[in-house]
Amino acid sequence: MARYTEAVCRQCRREGQKLFLKGDKCYTEKCAMVTRGKVPGAHGDGRSKTSEYGLQLREKQKAKRYYGVLEKQFRSYYDMAERKPGQAGQNLLSILETRLDNVIYRLGFAMSRAEARQLVTHGHFTVNGKKVNVPSYLVKPGMTITLKETSRDLEKIKSSLEANAFRQPPKWLEYDANSLVAKVVANPERDDIDLPIEEHLVVELYSK
């Protein structure tokens, strides 16, 4: 499985905003956006005005980095979004939201999507009663996601749930905190996605 192996804090600095890729560190003063907020590279402070293409590219890169998706897979999601009825940009974000690793993050089992991806890969969750260890697995309405009984005493999961107790899952997910079971009740709408992404710029980029 291909994955990004460089320092993820550089990605936040390149986009000029927190992408919350390092979990709880992003909420402390040790965050790279606090200690080294400028764009990485020798000429980070001296970049010229961004072109229209540059704005579109940066928006695509930001969306990819939020969800931890590489270019080939991101493009396949876009092609999938174009084939669906409705607006391609909103369809794209809806597809990305329904990745299993993102769902686990949204439910509060992990402090970052990268951490959620690891939990899924290690087989800590079931979907409709069957173990799924593929982070890119796309959930659909009616599916049930459950934390396995043998994983409920893991300290990392318990600490994440405690830290995220204040966070409400999006309305397209029903979650029972007592049984640690969630159900997908609808496909996510644009209003359900709280990320500062201008998806129309991504559509414009791929439409060239």
Image (spheres, rainbow, N blue to C red):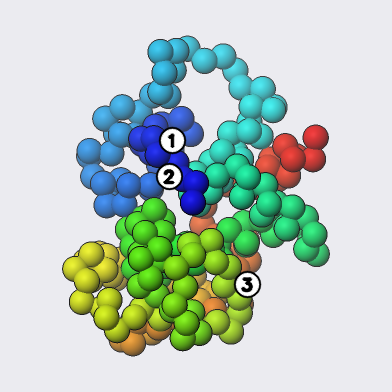
| Depth check, front residue: 37 or 95 | 95
Say which element carries label 2: loop
Q: Could you tell me residue 184's position as x and y percent?
A: 54, 79
| Disc number for residue 92 | none
Residue highlighted by disc 3? 187
Q: Residue at horizontal 50%, vertical 84%?
A: 128
Q: Residue at horizontal 22%, vertical 38%?
A: 30
| Quarter of the figure with residue 97 | bottom right
Q: Is residue 88 visible?
A: no
Classify residue 77 as left or right of residue 32. right
Q: Earlier in the sequence, mark 1 or mark 3?
A: 1
Q: Could you tell me residue 37's position as x and y percent?
A: 35, 28
Q: Amino acid at mark 2?
A: Leu
Residue highlighted by disc 2? 19
Q: Residue at horizontal 64%, vertical 27%?
A: 54
Mark 2 and 1 residues: CB-CB less than 8 Å, in contact? yes
Quarter of the figure that contains the C terminus? top right
Classify residue 71 as left or right of residue 156. right
Point out the frontmost of discs 2 and 1: 1
Residues packed near mark 3 inside 10 Å, few (<14), some (14 to 19) or many (20 plus): some
Q: Could you tell me residue 73's position as x and y percent?
A: 61, 50
- Quick check: 60 above or below 47? below
User: Going by the picture, which residue comes out furthest to the front?
Assistant: 1
Q: Amino acid at mark 3?
A: Asn
| Depth check, front residue: 136 or 47 | 136
Q: Earlier in the sequence, mark 2 or mark 1?
A: 1
| Disc number for residue 11 | 1
